[in-house]
Amino acid sequence: MKKLLFLVLIMPLLAKAQIGLNDSTAIRNDTLVAQEIVLEGVKVIAFKPLKFSSTKAKNHYYWLQKKVYHAYPYAKIAAEKLEKLKQELATIKSKRKRKKHTRKVQKYLEGEFTDQLKKLTKTEGQILAKLVHRQTGITTYQLVKNLRSGWRAFWYQRTAKLFSIDLKAKYNPNTIKEDFLVEDILQRFFAKGLLDEQEKKIDFDYYALVKKWGEY
């Protein structure tokens, strides 16, 4: 069942890649908040001290750091492979050959990533589903529906629900504080070079959100 769940999250999208997530020393307790400064055409991100509302909130933030660190690379690869698949399908005129090519990619992906995805926790699985939306502009549910079928997406959603994961969940740091915390963590990792930044496909202003949410 757990194996099926993570195939649901990423099977239609991923391809073989090396993901360096074994450096446990990479995650450290930051005490900074972002501010964008442009110096002679070069963007520099400066940070100010974080302000947590409680010890519980602080511990939650650093716990969330680890979850984001493990989940984001998979969402990044998903976006890359989705774009590659779109480009490949654009060169195939035959509808039958397009379907055949898509099935071939899906079968390959199932075999390549099952063991890696099984290592993700339930929380990381939900974060991954949301980050797929951040990186592609489409929910995981819609991606499965587009690449497989509505019937398959329905059953995948039911399976994911058994693990308290919603494949229809959207990434919305504008109104969901947990999503803002995820975004804040991502921005810090990008700035420090701990994760490779990829252009997001949904619109929001991170710097405005820092001011909106204020205390962590």
Image: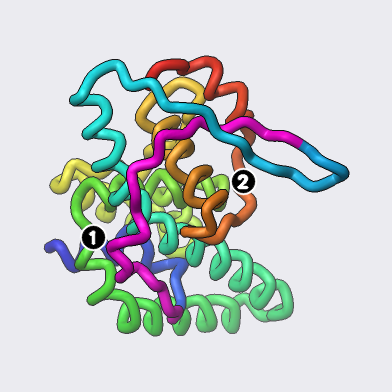
Q: Nearer the viewer, residue 111 or 118?
A: 118
Image quarter where the N terminus lies is bottom left
Expressed as whole percent of the image width and height from the top left, the position of residue 108 reads 39, 84
Please state which amino acid type lies under the numbered disc 1: Leu
**Secondary structure category for the residue under label 1:** loop
Give the percent coordinates (x, y) of residue 132: 46, 51
How many C-alpha atoms fall within 10 Å of the one at disc 1: few (<14), some, or many (≥20)? some
**Rounded to the nearest whole Å, what is the CA distance between mark 1 and mark 2?**
24 Å
Which residue is the site of mark 1? Answer: 120
Q: Indicate the quadrant containing the C terminus: top left, top right, bottom left or bottom right.
A: top left
Residue at 62% of width from left, 31% of height from top?
35
> What residue appears at the point 81 percent right and 40 percent down from the top-left corner?
39
Q: Are marks 1 and 2 in contact (CB under 8 Å)?
A: no
The verdict on residue 30 being magenta is: yes
- Which callout, 1 or 2, points to the residue nearer the camera? 1
Q: Is residue 97 left or right of residue 75?
A: right
Q: Earlier in the sequence, mark 1 or mark 2?
A: 1
Q: Residue at x 23, y 60 (%)?
A: 120
Q: Residues within 10 Å of mark 2 (few under 14, many from 20)?
A: some
Picture coordinates of residue 94, whole percent (x, y): 67, 80
* Residue stretch in magenta: 16-37
Residue 153, quarter of the rendered image: bottom left
